[in-house]
């Protein structure tokens, strides 16, 4: 079955440490995204990538970094510069459907919950 | 700037009743809207979408209504079931091409 796999599901980090969250998709989607979700809030965009070797900052990119070396993979690194990294992180992908302008349905992974101790 | 918001943070309905979840958006240029359902501990899942050239779209037990005059959309769930308990997000396709902007979400509780 096609889908998005995020790992690890739970991660604990000490202050000052960098951590990398994995996101892999086998949907052959061009675009991939990272969102952050805090309790009682909507999803906020961290980074997105429309094509391999290209990515753009979202609304809250400070303290995060990404890479897109392969179409299937879009890992997110939470650096020590991120002041409040404890959150639920969601990876998503979408098919760039040029036939239906406006449409952009996101397929999400199950999420990774990061807790800073 | 762009923003998508919801009128109520929680909604409690009796099993079998209809549910209506409301959403307001601010960008009149948005051309595409989506509703997602997120169950506890999982990622959001697509429910239904609607383009700005439509007023209504129906799916299986769900209907989305779009009122562009007041920049409001709603999700109606018919005969609400316990499995419908989740957080529901409305989202709009922003002017940044691939960016999707999410509202804060409404938590739906279904009472047996």
Image (cartoon, rainbow, N blue to C red):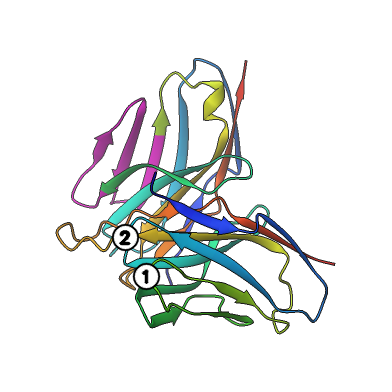
* Residue identifier under label 1: A71
Task: Specify few, some or many for label 1: CA neighbours under 10 Å numbering under 14, 14-19, or 20 or more.
Answer: many
**What's the chain of the residue with tag 2?**
A
Is there CB contact under 8 Å for labels 2 and 1? yes
- Residue A47 magenta-drawn? no
Task: Please provide percent x and percent y for residue A93.
Answer: 40, 60
Task: Please provide percent x and percent y for residue B57.
Answer: 26, 37
Asked whether the viewer can see residue B99, the reply is no
On-image quarter of the C terminus of chain B: top right
**What's the chain of the residue with tag 1?**
A
User: Could you tell me how far apart the alpha carbons at marks 2 and 1 are, in whole angstroms?
Assistant: 7 Å
Task: Please provide percent x and percent y for residue A16.
Answer: 80, 81
Magenta residues, start to end: B51-75
Q: Residue at x 53, y 49 (%)?
A: B43
- Give the answer, above or below, for where B89 lies relative to B102: above
Horizontal relation, residue A101 to residue B58: left or right? left
Between residue B87 and residue A13, name the one nearer to us: A13
Q: Quadrant of residue B46?
A: top left
- Residue B58 magenta-drawn? yes
Horizontal relation, residue B5 to residue B34: left or right? right
Q: Quadrant of residue B15?
A: top right
Q: Residue at x 37, y 82 (%)?
A: A54
* Residue identifier under label 2: A28
Secondary structure category for the residue under label 1: loop
Asked whether the viewer can see residue B78, the reply is yes
């Amino acid at each position: 079955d096609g889908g998005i796999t995020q790992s690890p599901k739970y991660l604990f980090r000490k202050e000052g440490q960098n951590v990398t969250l994995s996101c892999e998709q086998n949907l052959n989607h061009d675009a991939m995204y990272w969102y952050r979700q805090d309790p009682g809030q909507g999803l906020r965009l961290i980074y997105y990538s429309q094509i391999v070797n290209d990515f753009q900052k979202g609304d809250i990119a400070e303290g995060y970094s990404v890479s897109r070396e392969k179409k299937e993979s879009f890992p997110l690194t939470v650096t020590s510069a991120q002041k409040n990294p404890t959150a639920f992180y969601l990876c998503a992908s979408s098919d760039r459907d040029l036939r239906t302008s406006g449409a952009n349905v996101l397929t999400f992974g199950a999420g990774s919950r990061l807790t800073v101790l | 700037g762009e923003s998508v918001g919801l009128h109520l943070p929680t909604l409690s309905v009796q099993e079998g009743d209809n549910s209506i979840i409301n959403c307001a958006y601010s960008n009149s240029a948005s051309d595409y809207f989506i509703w997602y359902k997120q169950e506890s501990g999982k990622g959001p899942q697509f429910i239904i979408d609607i383009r700005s050239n439509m007023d209504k779209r129906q799916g299986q037990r769900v209907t989305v209504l779009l009122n562009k005059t007041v920049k409001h959309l709603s999700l109606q769930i018919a005969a609400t079931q316990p499995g419908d308990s989740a957080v529901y997000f409305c989202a709009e396709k922003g002017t940044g091409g691939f960016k999707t902007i999410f509202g804060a979400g409404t938590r739906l509780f279904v009472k047996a």
